[in-house]
Amino acid sequence: MTVGSAPRKPTPPGTFRELLDRFDPHVIDVRERSARIRLAVSDGDSWDVIVRGQHAWLEPPRDVFEPDARLSADSATWERVAHDLRGGMEAFRAGRLSVRLNLHLGVGFLAATSGITEPGRLRFESVKTKAGSVSTMQAGTGDPVVAIHGLGGTKASFLPTLAALVDTHRLIALDLPGFGDSDKPIAAPYDSAWFAGVVTDVMDELEIERAHLVGNSMGGRVAIELGLTASDRSERIVLLSPALAWLRDRRWAPVVKALRPELGLVQLAPRTVVERIVRTLIPGARDGWAGAGVDEFLRAYLTPRGRAAFYAAARNIYLDEPHGDDGFWTRLAELSPDTMFVWGRQDGLVPISFMNHVERVLPAARHLELDCGHVPQLERPRETHAAMRDFFAA
């Protein structure tokens, strides 16, 4: 009788083994006990990286396990990523390498396997504050810039900003509590004043006395609040399509005041229905930056605490009082740090007509109009970041 040899175990390609040999667990922040990151090869076999504690290893994908993040590229791109210390991020920025499902883990893996050890390398880490753990993405060694995302967004929306400023500034992009990979306390107020306090707590923990501020949408409103209440901590402020108090009649205000954000703890519609609706509402939400942004939104929104935080923050934006001694437009006139507003001519959420009101209230502010929508740093990155660098250097 002839005894056959035992089947050979599949061997991961040398490119992936080379990446794992450079793995630095101090650069990636895995919030759960472990993470499964799929390295998909469009013209070859895919492998899963399992990250657990200080360790990471490769294993073949198994149908019973869904990946937490997926990185996709062809074999030639993976070769370049393995052989060039900066190849991963360059391939990602150029669109040759796709990161989906979880940008925090996907980009964190690229940073952890880059082999870069110089000061200012890209890293993901959590910062402890009174509001809980706040997830951050940091890189660079120059003057600090704190970037604050919009409603439903995450720190990943500032990846192009990080790439544009990292050679001259230290950029700290954070997930506000309730969003992304930060803690999501149930009873928090989720208004601009509370968020501004969290930002100053993060600055304190990182030993940053003063910083430039960049805020998009709701993050812009938070940056304004920080500039008003803690001007001694704020250098210059860049506001990208910032959320501003409504000037027209808010007919639904009594109803919105009566609604409780805690209702978000209950998910009435199935996940598949929610995802289909969101991707239908946002053009291009199947791929590219828009698709990755929707992934980031759904990652938090499809959790009970994430939904409650989203509804609470949205409610506060709508109910922001425009007039009176404590009204937004009255207080805006007191904003003392130098400020630049960036407006999108196609913005359907913050119409460019708001610029006229800002010019009357804050005549010293600078303004930049761009042919884009609500997220200038993603839609018009070259113009946005060139203006930002000039403004910070002035």
Image: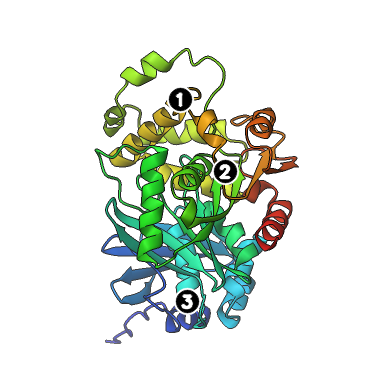
In primary-sequence order, the first of circles 1 and 2 is 2
- Residue 285 occupies which quadrant of the picture? top right
Element at label 3: loop
Q: Is residue 245 above or below residue 275?
A: above
Q: Amino acid at mark 1?
A: Glu
Q: CA distance from mark 3 to mark 2?
A: 27 Å
Mark 1 burial class by Cα count in 10 Å: few <14, some 14-19, many 20+: some
Q: Is residue 96 visible?
A: no
Alpha-carbon distance for marks 1 and 3? 48 Å
Determine the residue positioned at 57% across, 80% down.
Answer: 85
- Whether residue 234 is visible here, answered yes or no, is yes
List the residue tagged with mark 2.
286
How crowded pointer 3 is (Cα within 10 Å; few <14, some 14-19, many 20+) is rated as many
Viewer-proximal residue, 280 or 10? 280
Distance from Cα at disc 1 to Cα at disc 2? 37 Å
User: What residue does disc 1 label?
Assistant: 321
- Horizontal arrangement in the rendering, residue 26 relative to residue 149 (left or right): left
Residue at 35% of width from left, 36% of height from top? 307
Residues packed near mark 2 inside 10 Å, few (<14), some (14 to 19) or many (20 plus): some
Q: Nearer the viewer, mark 1 or mark 3?
A: 1
Residue that carries the numbered disc 3 in the rendered image: 113
Question: Picture coordinates of residue 269 (x, y %)?
Answer: 35, 28
Q: From what the image shows, is residue 336 above or below residue 165? A: above
Disc 1 to disc 2: CB gap under 8 Å: no
203 w.r.t. 294: above or below: below
Q: Earlier in the sequence, mark 1 or mark 3?
A: 3
The nearer-to-camera label among 1 and 2 is: 1
Give how far across and how far down residue 302 sits, in percent: 36, 40
